[in-house]
């Protein structure tokens, strides 16, 4: 993004919606539901909500405040605030480089499903085995990924992402409305009770370090924090806007979409898959397996399904565009390459790694590292290791080097009251760093104990 001309978002809700639409993406619709299903339903949901109102609040607020204070994107901002070591900048560059290629693999799956609904093959997609046989083929998933990546790259290449941002301000609320309608349909099915109970009622016996780490990584991923991106967003925020309120609104919107997506997908496992609970462990494919079954049962399901996949595709594209944009601008900063060259090189890079991820479900499916497919491994390394580490470093940086007061002053600009000032102080200096460290260490120890990750 252009760091010289910082046009501020024109209206208050404009900032919130722009940040929220970068945040809302596959993380909410694809990743949250399958993690919730896998990690015990209600207990995961509860952990996520607790982490969102504490760690999520403190980190999102700190990142946006740093951006608005320095009017710079992350590398420049941390440097301006006196950080000598480069570690945050380096992690902030590596993380989007790991996420973007596999994000495009999943984006390709969404594009395929959009095409399936468009061409009326939705009944076949509702059959058992449709998804697994699709991802195990070689050419098609790579082709659809190339379509998704191609659209992303063209937008980044032409630098027209501002136009996309404007469209998303309208389309995101439409997506939300559609999700509410589908969720109401699912939860009012006569046999929804068992699934809803699983999703909403915490079962403490499922509490584990690994589950908490999963929820923490998901929180960072979903809010696009712990990778420096929200710093850039903050640098575009107006001084008059209320930072604290905006943070609440972004978090609320983002979590609401994720929780509702879970409320559609998790109970559907019980309702439409004949009570086959092993489906809860389906992992990255869960959304693609369950949703066609929901739309198959839904009156006018083809149209609703088509709209749903169109809007999901749009949400995924807005996220992949800002991810690729982050990769390109980081690499440009470090290499001094021109924008055109960087965009081409990074698109080829994403294509190669994305292809490997795609083949991980087909030709390379017997190749597993720590029992994980290649896509799962990249997802795990970025979300469950690197992002918590970067979040921890951010807490130390804000809590002890620039001091929480610097963020507090930024929030209190124009005599705005910072209601949760003390809470923020305690969180950023003590609770977040200690909590993140404890979660990381405990899950590393327990996975070492089990000898699997
Ligand atoms: N939050 C996005 C989602 O839920 C994914 C994401 C992570 C992202 N980091 C990002 C998007 C940075 C844009 C920029 O899908």
Image: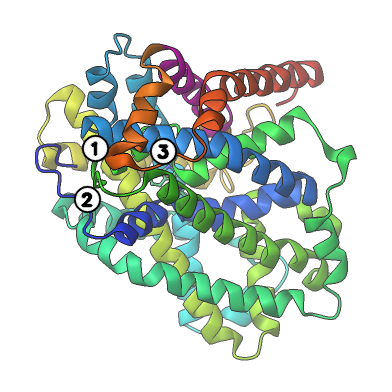
Q: How crowded is mark 1: few (under 14 residues within 10 Å), some or many (20 or more)?
A: many
For label 3, the crowd category at 10 Å Cα-Cα, with few meaning under 14, some 14 to 19 and many 20 or more, is some
Which quarter shows the N terminus?
top left
- Would you say the residues marked 2 and 1 are in contact, meaning their CB atoms lie under 8 Å apart? yes
Res. 156 mark: 2
Counting residues from the start of the chain, the first of labels 2 and 1 encountered is 2
Comes first in the chain, label 2 or label 3? 2
Q: Quadrant of residue 136?
A: bottom right
| Mark 2 within 8 Å of ligand 1, using the beta carbon | no
Q: Name the residue under label 3.
A: 353
Q: Is residue 42 magenta?
A: no
Reply above or below: 324 against 123: above
Q: What element carries label 2?
A: helix
Q: Where is residue 164 in the image (x, y as percent from the top left)?
A: 26, 62
Which residue is found at the position 21% from the left and 63% from the top?
Answer: 163
Q: Nearer the viewer, residue 149 or 326?
A: 326
Magenta stretch secondary structure, dominant: helix
Q: Which structural element holds mark 3?
A: helix
Q: Which residue is pictured at 51% across the width and 25% down the height?
A: 425
Please state which of the two labelled residues, at mark 1 or mark 3, is closer to the viewer: 1
Q: Mark 1 points at which residue?
A: 328
């Amino acid at each position: 993004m252009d760091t010289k001309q910082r046009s501020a978002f024109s209206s208050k809700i404009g900032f919130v919606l722009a940040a929220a639409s970068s945040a809302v993406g596959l993380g909410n619709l694809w990743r949250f539901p399958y993690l919730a299903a896998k990690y015990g339903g209600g207990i995961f949901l509860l952990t996520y909500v607790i982490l969102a109102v504490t760690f999520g609040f403190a980190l999102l607020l700190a990142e946006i405040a740093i951006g608005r204070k320095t009017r710079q994107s992350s590398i420049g901002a941390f440097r301006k605030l006196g950080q000598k070591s480069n570690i945050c900048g380096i992690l902030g560059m590596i993380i989007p480089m790991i996420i973007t290629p596999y994000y495009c693999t999943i984006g390709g799956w969404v594009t395929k499903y959009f095409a399936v609904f468009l061409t009326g093959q939705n009944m076949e997609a509702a059959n058992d085995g449709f998804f697994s046989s699709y991802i195990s083929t070689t050419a098609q998933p790579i082709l659809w990924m190339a379509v998704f990546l191609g659209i992303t790259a063209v937008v980044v290449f032409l630098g027209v992402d501002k136009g996309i941002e404007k469209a998303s301000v309208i389309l995101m609320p439409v997506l939300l409305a559609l999700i509410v309608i589908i969720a109401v349909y699912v939860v009012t099915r006569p046999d929804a009770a068992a699934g809803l109970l699983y999703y909403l009622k915490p079962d403490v016996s499922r509490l584990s370090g690994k589950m908490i780490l999963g929820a923490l990584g998901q929180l960072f991923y979903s809010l696009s924090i712990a990778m420096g991106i929200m710093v850039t967003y903050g640098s575009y925020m107006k001084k008059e806007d209320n930072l604290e309120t905006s943070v609440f609104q972004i978090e609320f919107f983002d979590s609401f979409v994720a929780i509702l997506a879970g409320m559609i997908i998790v109970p559907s496992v019980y309702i439409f898959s004949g009570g086959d609970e092993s489906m809860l462990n389906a992992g990255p494919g869960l959304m693609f397996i369950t949703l066609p079954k929901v739309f198959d049962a839904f009156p006018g399901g083809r149209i609703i399904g088509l709209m749903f996949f169109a809007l999901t595709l749009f949400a995924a594209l807005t996220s992949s565009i800002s991810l690729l944009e982050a990769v390109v601008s980081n690499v440009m900063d470090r290499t001094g390459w021109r924008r055109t060259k960087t965009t081409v090189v990074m698109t080829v890079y994403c294509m190669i790694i994305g292809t490997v991820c795609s083949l991980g479900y087909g030709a390379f499916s017997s190749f597993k590292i720590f029992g994980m497919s290649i896509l799962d491994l990249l997802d795990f390394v970025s979300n469950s290791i690197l992002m918590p580490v970067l979040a921890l470093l951010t807490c130390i940086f804000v809590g002890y080097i620039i001091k929480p007061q610097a963020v507090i002053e930024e929030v209190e600009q124009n005599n705005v009251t910072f209601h949760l000032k003390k809470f923020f102080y305690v969180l950023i200096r003590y609770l977040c760093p200690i909590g993140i460290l404890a979660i990381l260490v405990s899950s590393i120890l327990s996975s070492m104990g089990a000898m699997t990750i």
